């Protein structure tokens, strides 16, 4: 009876050790992203837009870089500048790897966000960042393909309206594949860490 219990205990211990090794192996292979892993998503897979310099742009233009893309508008009082500041700070935290990071800003306010305004806006955060523009009649289709919501909110005058909109960012790996959704307010260090993980893969 004693030998039988001992055998069972040894078998159980061996199984537990094997399971532990399997879990360790799995955790080592799966990066610990702070952002929400949406690898393989069937939305936010790409774009064809014009940048603030008038140049047509697609994800293919940034191959070899991690791309972070945010939807906003230049007259946004808080969420948009905060998100862009976080992007710029994440780039700084990356050091030399910052050259392999591209920040993109897609305007949801094409009525007011002219190329000149967007160029100046990007320059206030990082000169390498690009603002992208969709024609007003094409913007709803672009937003839908990214599952982005936006809505004009009337102000005291016709031109003083504001915009309600989704506040997260999409993160693409150096091969142009959608990988992460970065929630608003996550912070620059967390974003920099996720970018570094994607660059090192």
Image (cartoon, helix red, strand yellow):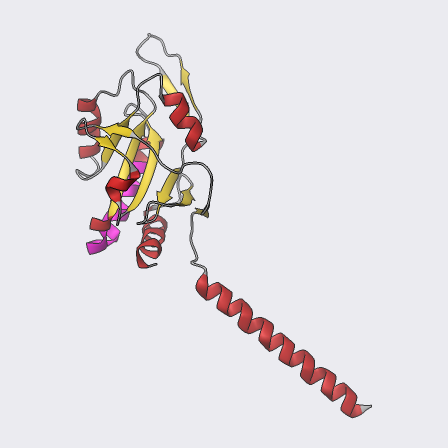
Q: Is residue 17 magenta?
A: no
Q: Nearer the viewer, residue 174 or 194?
A: 174
Q: Position of residue 28 (x, y in %)?
A: 45, 66
Principal secondary structure, stretch drawn in magenta: helix
Q: Position of residue 144 (x, y in %)?
A: 44, 27
Q: Quadrant of the N terminus?
A: bottom right
Q: Position of residue 120 (x, y in %)?
A: 17, 28
Q: Is residue 94 magenta?
A: yes
Q: Residue at x 32, y 36 (%)?
A: 82
Q: Is residue 146 left or right of residue 115?
A: right
Q: Quadrant of the C terminus?
A: bottom left
Q: Quadrant of residue 23?
A: bottom right
Q: Is residue 23 left or right of residue 148?
A: right
Q: Position of residue 164 (x, y in %)?
A: 41, 23
196 to 25, vertically: above or below:
above
- Number of callouts in the render? 0
The answer, for residue 170, to whether it is visible in the render is yes
Q: Nearer the viewer, residue 17 or 44?
A: 44
Q: Is residue 108 left or right of residue 113?
A: right
Q: Residue at x 38, y 27 (%)?
A: 142
Residue sticking out furthest to the right? 1
The answer, for residue 148, to whether it is visible in the render is no
> Magenta part of the protein: which range?
83-98
């Amino acid at each position: 009876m004693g030998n039988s219990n001992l055998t069972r205990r040894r078998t159980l211990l061996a199984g537990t050790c094997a399971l532990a090794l399997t879990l360790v192996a799995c955790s080592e292979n799966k990066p610990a992203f702070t952002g929400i892993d949406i690898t393989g998503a069937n939305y936010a897979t790409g774009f064809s837009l014009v940048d603030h310099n008038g140049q047509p742009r697609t994800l293919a233009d940034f191959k070899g870089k991690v791309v972070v893309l945010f939807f906003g508008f230049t007259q946004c009082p808080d969420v948009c500048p905060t998100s862009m500041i976080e992007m710029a700070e994440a780039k700084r935290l990356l050091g030399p790897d910052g050259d392999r990071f591209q920040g993109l800003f897609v305007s949801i306010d094409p009525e007011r966000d002219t190329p000149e305004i967007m160029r100046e806006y990007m320059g206030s955060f990082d000169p390498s960042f690009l603002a992208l523009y969709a024609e007003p009649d094409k913007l709803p289709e672009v937003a839908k393909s990214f599952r982005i919501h936006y809505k004009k909110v009337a102000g005291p005058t016709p031109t003083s309206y504001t915009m309600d909109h989704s506040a997260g960012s999409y993160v693409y790996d150096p091969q142009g594949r959608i990988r992460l959704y970065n929630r608003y307010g996550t912070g620059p260090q967390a974003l920099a860490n996720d970018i570094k993980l994607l660059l090192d893969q």
